[in-house]
Image: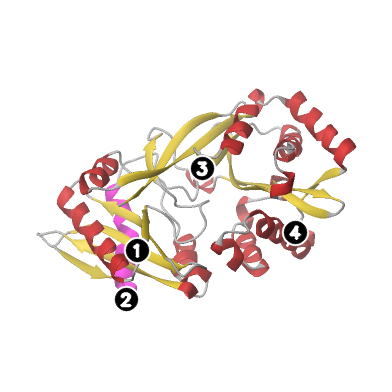
């Protein structure tokens, strides 16, 4: 068994092609787009690489067949600790290959001085490619979401990895939304606290990007990732996903013209590619409220604005809130108030 570092275009092509062999015939899996992966692995597009590094490997089994892949990466935090992660793990149903892949990645991370290692995760934001799917294998993979065979979890545990975070995906059907309750909250916020909700507009892209950046910076002051995030990064991201978003899928909350909250959804590109029938899926990719305005119901006011925009259309929609950590009580409470149900679970693991 041999591991090859991905350092040529040909090896990169092999790295990208491995999932098509693992998931051949699986109707619920959707291919990861090269343009999305390039945002992660290209140093000119991923600002985290400036404070760390990443490597990728493919592994050949004892018969010289391509049997798996993995990526490892780390970033140096403000306190100088080195945080490591691994991801984009794909493997045939073979514990020996799985163990070899994990050993290669973890040894490299350990050699770099990582004080913590978590996976499978993305080298970037948690709204994409985060966690190992452990529930919801019968549901189609959403855009930018990890999908994997059920046997991966057993491989991780037999290797000795321990569960770290449990991350849920919630499903919301528009006909189940408590619309009157949302309206009451929105009206109260407007009358009592002078909070208004504004729809995003591509015609004023720079203004809204600046406001979104302000919400993120004020919401995640302790996060190295968001401290590094610049308005240009947000603008680049929004432009890159423009085919799957529209003005009325992104809403911001303001008090006296100061941005204090954000709720953003995108169309499910995987569903569009597969030309699936039925309700159209929308995936939430950003929700944030500045700390001093939390527990006021801002997120419900944002949800009301989105609901009103969607219900006015003839298209039936189903909403998915992804990446909700089971330890986040505020989000769990928000989901309960929307009558949302857990439909998928992802987990991360650590040594």
Marks 3 and 1, the one that precedes in the sequence: 1
For the point 61% across and 37% down, the residue is: 330
Disc 1: CA contacts within 10 A as few (<14), some (14-19) or many (>=20): many
Say if the magenta span includes residue 10: yes
Q: Which residues are magenta?
A: 6-23
For label 4, the SS is helix
- Label 3 vs label 1: CA separation? 29 Å
- Label 2 vs label 4: CA separation? 40 Å
Residue underneath mark 2 = 8
Disc 4: CA contacts within 10 A as few (<14), some (14-19) or many (>=20): many
The answer to whether 345 is drawn above or below residue 31 in the figure is above
Camera-side residue of 243 and 50: 50
For the point 66% across and 64% down, the residue is: 235
The answer to whether 94 is drawn above or below residue 214 in the figure is above
Q: Is residue 293 left or right of residue 91?
A: right
- Whether residue 317 is visible, yes or no, is no
- Label 1 vs label 2: CA separation? 17 Å
Residue underneath mark 4 = 211
For label 3, the SS is helix
- Label 1 vs label 4: CA separation? 33 Å
Residue 129: where, in percent of width, then height? Answer: 44, 52
Q: Is residue 111 left or right of residue 318?
A: left
Residue underneath mark 1 = 72
For label 2, the SS is loop
- Label 3 vs label 4: CA separation? 30 Å
Marks 3 and 4, the one that precedes in the sequence: 4
């Amino acid at each position: 068994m041999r591991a090859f570092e991905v350092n040529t275009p040909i090896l990169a092509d092999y790295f990208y092609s491995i999932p098509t062999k693992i998931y051949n015939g699986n109707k619920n899996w959707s291919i990861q787009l090269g343009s999305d992966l390039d945002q992660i692995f290209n140093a000119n597009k991923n600002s985290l690489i400036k404070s760390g590094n990443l490597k990728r490997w493919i592994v050949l089994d004892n018969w010289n067949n391509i049997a798996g892949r993995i990526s490892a990466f780390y970033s140096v935090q403000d306190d100088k600790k080195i945080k490591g992660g691994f991801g984009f793990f794909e493997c045939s149903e073979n514990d020996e290959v799985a163990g070899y892949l994990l050993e290669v990645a973890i040894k490299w991370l350990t050699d770099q001085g990582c004080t913590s290692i978590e996976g499978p995760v993305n080298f970037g934001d948690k709204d994409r490619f985060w966690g190992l799917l452990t529930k919801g294998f019968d549901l189609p993979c959403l855009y930018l979401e990890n999908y994997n065979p059920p046997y991966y979890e057993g491989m991780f545990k037999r290797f000795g990895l321990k569960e770290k975070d449990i991350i849920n995906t919630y499903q919301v059907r528009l006909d189940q939304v408590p619309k009157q309750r949302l309206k009451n909250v929105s009206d109260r916020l407007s009358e009592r606290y002078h909070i208004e909700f504004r729809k995003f507009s591509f015609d004023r892209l720079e203004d809204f990007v600046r406001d979104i950046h302000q919400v993120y910076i004020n919401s995640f002051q302790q996060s190295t990732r968001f401290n590094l995030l610049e308005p240009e990064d947000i603008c680049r991201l929004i432009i890159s996903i423009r085919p799957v978003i529209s003005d009325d899928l992104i809403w911001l909350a303001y008090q006296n013209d100061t941005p204090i909250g954000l709720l953003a959804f995108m169309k499910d590109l995987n569903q569009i590619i597969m030309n699936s029938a039925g309700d159209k899926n929308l995936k939430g990719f950003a929700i944030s409220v500045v700390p001093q305005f939390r527990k006021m119901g801002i997120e419900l006011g944002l949800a009301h604005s989105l609901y009103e925009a969607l219900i006015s259309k003839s298209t039936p929609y189903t909403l998915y809130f992804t990446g909700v950590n089971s330890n986040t009580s505020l989000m769990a409470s928000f989901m309960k108030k929307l009558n949302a149900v857990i439909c998928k679970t992802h987990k991360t693991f650590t040594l």
